[in-house]
Image (cartoon, rainbow, N blue to C red):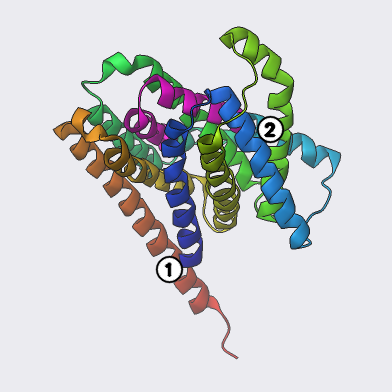
Amino acid sequence: MRKAYLQMHVAIVLWGFTAILGKLISLDEGLLVWYRMMLSSIATFIFLLSTKKFERLSFKEVKHVAGIGAVITLHWITFYGAIKASNVSIAISCFSSVALFTALLHPLIRRKLPQRSEILLGVVVMLGIYIIFSVQQFYLKGILLSLVSALLASIFTIFNKSLSGKHDPALITFYELGTGFLLLTLFLPVWFYTNHSTIVLPNLNDWFYLIILSVFCTTVAFTLSLHALKKLDAFTMNLSVNLEPLYSIALAIILFHEDKMLNTGFYIGSLIILLAVVVHGYSNIRNAKKIQLRKDKKAPIV
């Protein structure tokens, strides 16, 4: 469990840089995601070949993975759209609602009733978001896009859980990002038409940021998160992902001076989110220890 938590938090730290890099890259959200998926797929494929872990999935599994890849693509487009429509702090903090979406969706997908404790923690996170942005209603478009992105992130994390124990995490990452890239490529003409844009080659700075975003913040982070999901449940992952806003906002304050638009409510809300993550993580570790202790007591003495 400790190793899984470490892998999860390293992935979250890397994800904390994604919003910052999205702000720095001059491309629109559609092209940004297209280049990110292309570079990430190439990097993951090279890794799989070098470690001899590449294998072909069945057609049924490819269909499943392609569906998740489509959700990831839409999640990223709405996420970077939220950043460009508002700023890093607003987009990334509203993304914390992923915990509440997971608390509601995960049990329903398994045809079970949501646990009260998980709903309560999700509501606490939403309370933190409400306090942070109680005076930021004029960023409505960015807030709505971020909430849609959080819903999509919750969906793909839940379905990733069913794949995490069947295949190597890097292999799943490759197929998800690869199919997502192919699907987005097919829809690029529609994107260009609706946004009155065209294909643009990144400049040198954009290439530099895209490589960091694609290799470290995508390939490495996704692989680590899938390793963690072998031991952790989807709700724990998504609630802990609420630490990502704190990392991203801290970086945004340093790089973009976004503290000038933050108020006391922001700091109170951030503390509430952090406490919810810490309490849930501590509760899971304690419950895991109790379960293990019961198993040890029942084990036969040899």
Position of residue 291 measured from the top left corner of the image (x, y, whole percent)? 47, 66
- Residue 7 placement, left or right of 37: left
* Residue 98 falls inside the magenta stretch: yes
Question: What label does residue 61 carry, if any?
Answer: none
For the question of whether residue 112 can be seen, the reply is: no
In the image, 245 versus 236, the foreground residue is 245
Residue at the (34%, 49%) spot, across then down: 277
What kind of residue is marked 2?
A: Gly
For the question of whether residue 205 can be seen, the reply is: yes
Q: Residue furthest bottom?
A: 302
Give neighbour class at mark 2: few <14, some 14-19, many 20+ (Cα, 10 Å): many
As helix, strand or loop, the secondary structure at mark 2 comes to helix
- Residue 100 placement, left or right of 198: left
Count of picture labels? 2
Question: What label does residue 180 carry, if any?
Answer: 2
Specify the segment rendered in magenta. 72-100
Disc 2 to disc 1, how far (Cα)?
A: 39 Å
As helix, strand or loop, the secondary structure at mark 1 comes to helix
Residue at the (62%, 23%) spot, across then down: 200
Q: Earlier in the sequence, mark 2 or mark 1?
A: 2
Q: Which residue is mark 1?
A: 289
In the image, 295 versus 255, the foreground residue is 255
Give neighbour class at mark 1: few <14, some 14-19, many 20+ (Cα, 10 Å): few
Q: Residue furthest front?
A: 204
